[in-house]
Amino acid sequence: MDYLSEIEGKQAHDPMFLEKMKESSSSSSSCLCVPGPVIVGAGPSGLATAACLKEKGVPSVILERSNCIASLWQLKTYDRLRLHLPKQFCELPLMGFPTGFPTYPSKQQFVDYLEAYARKFDIKPRFNETVSQAEYDPTLGFWRVTSVGVKGKEMEYVCRWLVVATGENAEAMMPEMEGMGEFSGDIRHTSLYKSGEEFRGKRVLVVGCGNSGMEVCLDLCNHNARPSLVVRDTVHVLPQEMLGTSTFGLSMWLLKWFPLRLVDRFLLIVSWLMLGDTSRFGLARPHLGPLQLKNLSGKTPVLDVGTLAKIKSGDIKVRPSIKSLKRHAVEFVNGTTENFDAIILATGYKSNVPSWLKEKVMFSEKDGYPRRPFPNGWKGEYGLYAVGFTKRGLLGTSMDAIRIAEDIQRCWNEEAKHRLAFTNSLLHQSSSL
């Protein structure tokens, strides 16, 4: 399908359209008309959507600001990372994991899987292109997406559909703490943490008790560092496996037969029997159950991979919230002060959509997430879509990708019929002359 011909055929006699195209051609940026959707982001979300579209015969263009696919996994994760959920819950559509992979694939195995996925579906993102702006142009009836390359060269893409696949983890969240400029030690986000080897023998304070914070503490212990963990809020800690199977898989199975609150109660009882009373070690549980809390707030329970045993043994110290930082020390809200050599911020990530998408209906300007909750946040107006914002991991990503591809294919096929009818009409008119 010649997309440029379609645009010209539709609006060649529209003076406003002609003026817009003249403005684009006179600007310093190059302009490319894309036959299918533009997908922003080449992580698992973008790859899954592109594969589903290709399987339905719809081409797409992926723009990726980094120099590789899955840049978060390849460039911003620690070495010991593994999938926290069994591989069957982390597969992308149309292709499973190799049979030889373990239940919980390693970071490198997951990256290998994604690269094989891209090869299978011949997905070739345009790397080193950072989208600086995307806006729907009502005059054209298309999206105009501007990207900036490595050397500052601008490129404009004109497309009928725009898929936002930058996800929940686009930018590291760096909390403001009093005295950050005064602290003489190393302060870094987990996106810059690779291994505890460089912290061997050092006193390290890890801020944040989610899955990353807990696992970084364990990694530091295994490299003979002396970690402490700041627990600022209540947290659900569950065993990664219970009753001989994965906790997540068991939960999904139980939810088919029992109400959520009953499943939550079951999970907490088994966790108490296996792990004991976590509040005794400074890890108080929320009032809401783990699944109910996940549904309401998106907050994921911690799946313990050995950290709790280190907390119980005293190898990892639990500390309250930070009041302020000193030159060599940290003052906590309970009035105590301790010396530390480094601080690791396991404070998570955030969406960056509001910084480049000029749209206020589908996405919240406050947090960069779709305003409509799961499972209805994947589709907006004028051909705008979102994938990977469900707060339900790779399982939610796959669900979004399949829905988006089906919806775009429906539009693609309808427009193909209109083009065919238009072409037949022109042929009939020319033969009558």
Image (tube, helix red, strand yellow):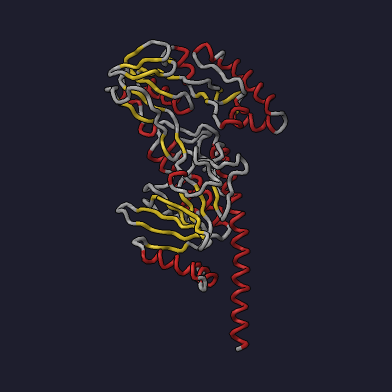
Q: Decide: is 275 above or below 28.
A: above
- The residue located at (31%, 23%) in the rendering is 199
> x, y percentage for residue 71?
41, 43
Say which of 204 and 164 sits in front.
164
> x, y percentage for residue 66?
38, 47
- The residue located at (30%, 53%) in the rendering is 151
Residue 156: quarter of image: bottom left
Query: Looking at the image, can residue 113 be seen?
Result: no
- The residue located at (44%, 68%) in the rendering is 19
Q: Decide: is 15 above or below 36.
A: below
Query: What is the quadrant of the C terminus in the image?
Result: bottom right
> x, y percentage for residue 37?
51, 57
Q: How many discs appear?
A: 0
In this image, 316 relative to 185: left or right?
Answer: right
Instruction: Farthest residue to the right: give it.
Output: 257
In this image, 302 relative to 128: left or right?
Answer: right
Instruction: Farthest residue to the bottom: give it.
Output: 433
Say which of 294 and 247 sits in front.
294
Q: Decide: is 187 above or below 47.
A: above
> x, y percentage for residue 88?
57, 38
Say which of 82 and 18 sits in front.
18
Say which of 270 and 71 sits in front.
71
- The residue located at (30%, 18%) in the rendering is 326
Query: Looking at the image, can residue 71 be seen?
Result: yes
